[in-house]
Amino acid sequence: MNKKLTTALLLSTFSVTTIHVINRVHTSLCTVKNLLANSENHYYEWRFGKIRYQKKGSGAPLLLVHDLTVGSSNYEYHRLINNLTEEHEIYSIDLLGYGLSDKPAITYTNNLYEQLINDFIKNVIKRKTSVVVTGESVPFVMMACHNNPDIVNKLICINPQNLYLQNQIPSKQTKLMKLFLESPILGTFTYHVLTNRHSMEKIFRTEYFCHSDEIKEKYIYNYLEAAYTGNYYSKYAFASYVGKYMNMNILHELKEINNSILMIGGEKEKDIKTTIENYKYYNAAIEDVYIPDTKHLPQLEAPDEVLEQIKIFLLL
């Protein structure tokens, strides 16, 4: 009996150690290129952690806010920034828990990010600013518009999240998944399995881009680095995302927003026209436009077309 117990303990110890080593090696491989390091990086000392941002250009301020999907960072907008700097002072940030910003072991919510946007505009930009935002970050930016109309000017939403999905709240199953992902060894290993290079490439091919031949290797590497910088702390935002803690109902705010709003859809994004029509049902002032032959990230796949729409809208 003692021999069996000893053998079981040894095997368990070996398994845990092996998984831990795999986790560390995989993290190192994903971050070794140090692609996100940049001499133009600045840091805002927010109360929940340091927020990385880049500032370029001069003119009317424009804040760029990336999506909440795994691996997202301000790199999402890198093909737009230099072409906007002649007329705008550009601020592109990494949200808390993403990119090179701090990644504390906390529960990440839309309300947390709404506070971040409010504080960043008030304390860093210090002027009323227009905002470009992607996907599942749209709700908290709209909430910021509604609650602080004096700090947000025009709003441009790229492939906004489905209103029905926004209303989904944490369930027993998603809460358990969040707790499991946050566990030290197995949770980290599961995060690595779900967000490895193969998984990231698949997301780019099936969800982000319409044409696979437009996907560049550097896109994959930058997203992987953003997803693993900060070691195992990088999994906490993902755990909250999977747990549905980042969702929020914004129907009331959507009806009352008076900001000028443009919604840019990737023409091939699943159900995007229905999604945007639902937004327009609650706020008839919303304008919409669709970028041909693109999916979730038209700012990476067809930046010239997206730039044209942004410039026209901001000039109106």
Image: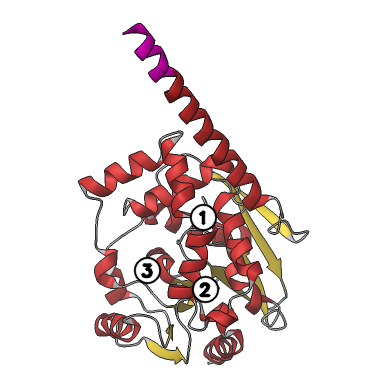
Q: Residue furthest left?
A: 172
* Quarter of the rendering occupied by the N terminus: top left
Horizontal side, residue 290 vs residue 37: left or right: left
Horizontal side, residue 125 vs residue 1: left or right: right
**Residue at numbered disc 2:** 131
Q: Nearer the viewer, mark 2 or mark 1?
A: 1
- Which residue corresponds to the image point at 52% horizontal and 73% vertical from the top-left? 131
| Residue 292 shows in this picture | yes
In the rendering, at what x and y percent does residue 204 appear? Answer: 50, 71
**Residue at numbered disc 1:** 196
Please determine whether, in this image, residue 31 is positioned above or below residue 294: above
Identify the amino acid type marked 2.
Answer: Val
- Which residue corresponds to the image point at 45% horizontal and 56% vertical from the top-left? 113
Name the magenta segment's main secondary structure: helix
Bounds of the magenta segment: 1-9
Q: Earlier in the sequence, mark 3 or mark 2?
A: 2
**Residue at numbered disc 3:** 146
Instruction: Tell me where residue 257 sits by quadrant.
Output: bottom left
Q: CA distance from mark 1 to mark 3?
A: 38 Å
Instruction: Tell me where residue 214 sits by quadrant.
Output: bottom right
Helix, strand or loop status at disc 1: loop
Q: Nearer the viewer, mark 3 or mark 2?
A: 2
- Which residue corresponds to the image point at 47% horizontal and 92% vertical from the top-left? 292
Please determine whether, in this image, residue 284 is positioned above or below residue 199: below
Q: Earlier in the sequence, mark 2 or mark 1?
A: 2
